[in-house]
Image (cartoon, rainbow, N blue to C red):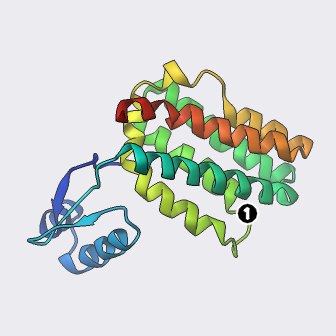
Protein backbone atom coordinates (compact mmCIF):
# COMPACT_ATOMS: atom_id res chain seq x y z
CA UNK A 1 0.00 0.00 0.00
CA UNK A 2 2.92 2.32 0.47
CA UNK A 3 4.07 2.26 -3.14
CA UNK A 4 7.60 0.95 -2.76
CA UNK A 5 7.57 -0.14 -6.39
CA UNK A 6 6.96 2.62 -8.94
CA UNK A 7 4.34 2.35 -11.72
CA UNK A 8 5.63 0.22 -14.58
CA UNK A 9 8.25 -1.69 -12.57
CA UNK A 10 8.32 -5.44 -13.19
CA UNK A 11 9.46 -7.94 -10.58
CA UNK A 12 9.99 -11.69 -10.61
CA UNK A 13 8.69 -14.08 -8.02
CA UNK A 14 12.19 -15.41 -7.38
CA UNK A 15 13.74 -11.95 -7.16
CA UNK A 16 11.12 -10.78 -4.70
CA UNK A 17 11.45 -13.95 -2.62
CA UNK A 18 15.22 -13.48 -2.43
CA UNK A 19 14.86 -9.81 -1.48
CA UNK A 20 12.43 -10.74 1.31
CA UNK A 21 14.41 -13.79 2.42
CA UNK A 22 11.49 -16.20 2.03
CA UNK A 23 10.59 -19.08 -0.26
CA UNK A 24 8.81 -18.50 -3.55
CA UNK A 25 5.53 -20.10 -2.44
CA UNK A 26 4.29 -17.37 -0.04
CA UNK A 27 5.46 -14.70 -2.49
CA UNK A 28 3.57 -16.40 -5.33
CA UNK A 29 0.39 -16.51 -3.23
CA UNK A 30 0.75 -12.88 -2.14
CA UNK A 31 1.33 -11.76 -5.72
CA UNK A 32 -1.71 -13.74 -6.87
CA UNK A 33 -3.82 -11.84 -4.35
CA UNK A 34 -2.34 -8.50 -5.45
CA UNK A 35 -3.13 -9.34 -9.08
CA UNK A 36 -6.72 -10.15 -8.03
CA UNK A 37 -6.88 -6.75 -6.25
CA UNK A 38 -5.62 -5.09 -9.46
CA UNK A 39 -2.57 -3.76 -7.63
CA UNK A 40 -0.32 -5.75 -9.99
CA UNK A 41 -0.55 -7.02 -13.57
CA UNK A 42 0.49 -10.59 -14.38
CA UNK A 43 3.09 -10.88 -17.15
CA UNK A 44 4.66 -13.90 -18.78
CA UNK A 45 7.75 -15.65 -17.40
CA UNK A 46 6.64 -15.53 -13.75
CA UNK A 47 6.80 -11.77 -13.54
CA UNK A 48 4.35 -9.16 -12.38
CA UNK A 49 4.31 -5.44 -13.05
CA UNK A 50 2.99 -2.47 -11.18
CA UNK A 51 0.32 -1.00 -13.48
CA UNK A 52 0.96 2.30 -15.19
CA UNK A 53 -1.27 5.11 -14.00
CA UNK A 54 -3.51 6.65 -16.65
CA UNK A 55 -5.61 9.78 -16.28
CA UNK A 56 -8.82 7.74 -16.43
CA UNK A 57 -7.63 5.21 -13.85
CA UNK A 58 -6.43 8.00 -11.57
CA UNK A 59 -9.80 9.77 -11.82
CA UNK A 60 -11.65 6.59 -10.87
CA UNK A 61 -9.33 5.79 -7.96
CA UNK A 62 -9.47 9.39 -6.75
CA UNK A 63 -13.29 9.33 -6.83
CA UNK A 64 -13.37 5.95 -5.09
CA UNK A 65 -11.04 7.18 -2.34
CA UNK A 66 -13.06 10.32 -1.78
CA UNK A 67 -16.43 8.56 -1.69
CA UNK A 68 -15.40 5.53 0.37
CA UNK A 69 -13.17 7.32 2.86
CA UNK A 70 -15.51 10.21 3.58
CA UNK A 71 -18.31 7.70 4.20
CA UNK A 72 -16.11 5.52 6.41
CA UNK A 73 -15.06 8.57 8.42
CA UNK A 74 -18.69 9.59 8.91
CA UNK A 75 -19.50 6.08 10.13
CA UNK A 76 -16.69 6.35 12.70
CA UNK A 77 -18.28 9.40 14.30
CA UNK A 78 -20.38 7.47 16.88
CA UNK A 79 -17.21 5.76 18.13
CA UNK A 80 -15.10 8.93 18.42
CA UNK A 81 -14.70 9.14 22.18
CA UNK A 82 -11.79 10.99 23.80
CA UNK A 83 -9.54 7.92 23.84
CA UNK A 84 -10.14 7.26 20.15
CA UNK A 85 -9.42 10.88 19.26
CA UNK A 86 -6.24 10.77 21.36
CA UNK A 87 -4.99 7.68 19.49
CA UNK A 88 -5.62 9.49 16.20
CA UNK A 89 -3.84 12.61 17.49
CA UNK A 90 -0.78 10.52 18.37
CA UNK A 91 -0.72 9.03 14.87
CA UNK A 92 -1.10 12.49 13.36
CA UNK A 93 1.79 13.74 15.48
CA UNK A 94 3.98 10.90 14.22
CA UNK A 95 2.97 11.71 10.65
CA UNK A 96 3.82 15.38 11.14
CA UNK A 97 7.20 14.49 12.66
CA UNK A 98 8.01 12.18 9.74
CA UNK A 99 7.11 14.92 7.27
CA UNK A 100 9.33 17.45 9.06
CA UNK A 101 12.22 14.97 9.01
CA UNK A 102 11.70 14.22 5.32
CA UNK A 103 11.15 10.52 6.09
CA UNK A 104 8.84 9.50 3.25
CA UNK A 105 8.58 5.86 4.38
CA UNK A 106 7.43 6.88 7.86
CA UNK A 107 5.16 9.58 6.43
CA UNK A 108 3.33 7.09 4.22
CA UNK A 109 3.17 4.51 7.02
CA UNK A 110 1.83 6.89 9.67
CA UNK A 111 -0.60 8.58 7.27
CA UNK A 112 -2.06 5.20 6.33
CA UNK A 113 -2.17 4.23 10.02
CA UNK A 114 -4.13 7.40 10.83
CA UNK A 115 -6.67 6.73 8.08
CA UNK A 116 -6.90 3.00 8.87
CA UNK A 117 -7.52 3.75 12.55
CA UNK A 118 -10.19 6.29 11.69
CA UNK A 119 -12.03 4.06 9.22
CA UNK A 120 -11.48 0.75 10.99
CA UNK A 121 -13.40 1.52 14.16
CA UNK A 122 -15.65 -1.47 13.58
CA UNK A 123 -14.21 -4.92 12.96
CA UNK A 124 -17.16 -5.76 10.71
CA UNK A 125 -16.67 -2.74 8.44
CA UNK A 126 -17.59 -3.47 4.83
CA UNK A 127 -15.89 -0.29 3.65
CA UNK A 128 -12.39 -0.96 5.01
CA UNK A 129 -11.51 -3.82 2.62
CA UNK A 130 -12.74 -1.70 -0.30
CA UNK A 131 -10.62 1.23 0.86
CA UNK A 132 -7.58 -1.00 1.25
CA UNK A 133 -8.06 -2.27 -2.30
CA UNK A 134 -8.05 1.31 -3.59
CA UNK A 135 -4.95 2.07 -1.49
CA UNK A 136 -3.17 -0.91 -3.06
CA UNK A 137 -3.96 0.37 -6.53
CA UNK A 138 -2.96 3.97 -5.89
CA UNK A 139 -0.03 3.22 -3.57
CA UNK A 140 2.69 3.31 -6.23
CA UNK A 141 1.64 6.84 -7.06
CA UNK A 142 1.88 8.03 -3.44
CA UNK A 143 5.64 8.53 -3.59
CA UNK A 144 5.21 10.93 -6.48
CA UNK A 145 2.60 12.82 -4.47
CA UNK A 146 4.96 13.23 -1.54
CA UNK A 147 7.82 14.54 -3.67
CA UNK A 148 6.24 17.99 -3.85
CA UNK A 149 3.75 17.78 -1.01
CA UNK A 150 4.81 21.03 0.65
CA UNK A 151 3.67 22.98 -2.38
CA UNK A 152 0.17 21.48 -2.33
CA UNK A 153 -0.52 20.51 1.27
CA UNK A 154 -0.53 23.71 3.28
CA UNK A 155 -3.26 22.88 5.82
CA UNK A 156 -3.12 19.94 8.24
CA UNK A 157 -6.37 18.25 7.26
CA UNK A 158 -5.92 15.63 9.97
CA UNK A 159 -6.26 18.42 12.54
CA UNK A 160 -9.47 19.51 10.82
CA UNK A 161 -10.73 15.92 10.97
CA UNK A 162 -9.85 15.67 14.67
CA UNK A 163 -11.68 18.93 15.40
CA UNK A 164 -14.73 17.69 13.47
CA UNK A 165 -14.68 14.41 15.43
CA UNK A 166 -14.52 16.31 18.72
CA UNK A 167 -17.43 18.53 17.65
CA UNK A 168 -19.46 15.62 16.28
CA UNK A 169 -19.70 17.50 12.98
CA UNK A 170 -20.23 14.97 10.18
CA UNK A 171 -20.20 17.52 7.35
CA UNK A 172 -16.91 19.02 8.55
CA UNK A 173 -15.41 15.55 8.97
CA UNK A 174 -16.37 14.55 5.43
CA UNK A 175 -14.99 17.85 4.12
CA UNK A 176 -11.69 17.37 5.98
CA UNK A 177 -11.19 13.86 4.60
CA UNK A 178 -12.09 14.93 1.07
CA UNK A 179 -9.68 17.88 1.33
CA UNK A 180 -6.95 15.63 2.75
CA UNK A 181 -7.22 13.32 -0.27
CA UNK A 182 -7.46 16.21 -2.74
CA UNK A 183 -4.49 18.05 -1.23
CA UNK A 184 -2.44 14.88 -0.88
CA UNK A 185 -2.79 13.42 -4.37
CA UNK A 186 -5.12 15.61 -6.43
CA UNK A 187 -2.28 17.68 -7.87
CA UNK A 188 -0.88 14.59 -9.62
CA UNK A 189 -3.77 14.57 -12.08
CA UNK A 190 -2.11 17.33 -14.12
CA UNK A 191 0.95 15.11 -14.67
CA UNK A 192 -1.21 12.49 -16.38
CA UNK A 193 -2.57 14.80 -19.07
Image quarter (top left, top right, bottom left or bottom right) of the N terminus: bottom left
Image quarter (top left, top right, bottom left or bottom right) of the C terminus: top left
Q: Is residue 164 left or right of residue 87?
A: right
Q: Residue at x 43, y 58 (%)?
A: 136
Q: Is residue 96 above or below residue 74?
A: above
Q: Residue at x 13, y 72 (%)?
A: 46
- Quadrant of residue 180 within the rendered picture: top right
Q: Can you give x and y, in whole percent of width and height, for residue 191 in the image? A: 36, 31
- Quadrant of residue 31 within the rendered picture: bottom left
Q: Nearer the viewer, residue 5 or 62?
A: 62
Residue with the most extreme left position: 45
Would residue 175 be seen by someone viewing this image from the given angle?
yes
Q: Can you give x and y, in whole percent of width and height, for residue 68 in the image? A: 64, 57
The local crowd at label 1, few if under 14, some if 14 to 19, many if 20 or more residues have their Cα within 10 Å, is some
Q: Is residue 129 left or right of residue 51?
A: right
Residue position for label 1:
121
Q: Can you give x and y, in whole percent of width and height, for residue 124 in the image? A: 70, 76
Q: Is residue 71 above or below residue 126?
A: above
**Mark 1 residue element:** loop
Q: Residue at x 82, y 36 (%)?
A: 163
Q: Total number of numbered labels?
A: 1
Q: Is residue 7 above or below residue 144?
A: below
Q: Residue at x 73, y 33 (%)?
A: 159
Q: Can you give x and y, in whole percent of width and height, for residue 181 in the image? A: 59, 40
- Quadrant of residue 97 within the rendered picture: top right
Would residue 103 be seen by someone viewing this image from the given angle?
no
Amino acid sequence: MSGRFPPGQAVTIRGLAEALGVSAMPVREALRRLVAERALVLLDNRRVRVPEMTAQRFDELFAARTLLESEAAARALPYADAGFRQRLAVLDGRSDAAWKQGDIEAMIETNLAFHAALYGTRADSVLMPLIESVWLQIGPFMRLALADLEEHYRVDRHQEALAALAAGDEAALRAAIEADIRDGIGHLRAQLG
